[in-house]
Image (cartoon, helix red, strand yellow):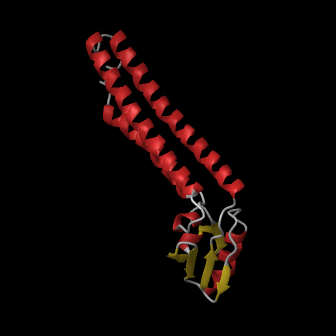
Amino acid sequence: MAQLQPLDMNELKRRMNGAISTLKNEYAGLRTGRASASLLDPVVADAYGQTMKVTELATVNVPEPRLITLTVWDKGTVAAVDKAIRNAGIGLNPQVDGTLIRIPIPPLNEERRKELSKLAGKYAEAARVAVRNVRRDGMDYLKRLEKEHVIGEDQHKKQSDDVQKMTDAEIKEIDAALAHKEKEIMQV
């Protein structure tokens, strides 16, 4: 049987940070009534016989808080980019002017703000669950190390406390990100 390795705290930290990174990416795609280039990240268009991200077909700019502009590089893909944005289900209505596409960001109504706030909460809870799963994996591994006499009871207790502190810090960061996003969504 292979020798068990000591618990790698950096690996646990990396996995927990992965959950937070995923959360931040999901938050970037939530429309808050303000223009953000990341709103277009999930939008894909059919161009050159394949599916490509809109951001790979044009330069994205945010000249004003409620306007996104796209400068499409190839005039032949303008219609595909326009169609992709309209059909993306993100509630945007692009206006084409040659190779320039203007996308005004409409203000959110109260009902939509509440829906987005709930969705942000769901994303945060999924991130908390992911962090807790990493914590559980670490704790289970520590129990196994102690059972197989690789570490002693004192070392198990100390490392368990370290894992818990790391988990608490990550959960606090998730809660802070959620509070920030909810504030951003609810601002009129």
Name the residue nearer the viewer: 155 or 123. 123
Name the residue nearer the viewer: 113 or 137. 113
**Furthest residue to the front?**
188
Depicted 112 relative to depicted 10: above or below: below
Name the residue nearer the viewer: 70 or 125. 125
Question: Is 123 placed left or right of 10 in the picture?
Answer: right
Residue depicted at 63% across the width and 75% down the height: 104
Residue 124, image quadrant? top right
Residue 173, image quadrant? top left
**Where residue 93 sits in the image (x, y, percent)?**
70, 73
Question: Is 73 placed left or right of 152 in the picture?
Answer: right
**Where residue 56 sits in the image (x, y, percent)?**
54, 71
Depicted 10 relative to depicted 41: above or below: above
Image quadrant in which the C terminus is located: bottom right
Question: Is 42 placed left or right of 154 in the picture?
Answer: right
Residue depicted at 69% across the width and 60% down the height: 109
Image quadrant in which the N terminus is located: top left
Residue 133 can be seen in this image: yes
**Where residue 134 sits in the image (x, y, percent)?**
45, 31
Residue depicted at 61% across the width and 42% down the height: 122
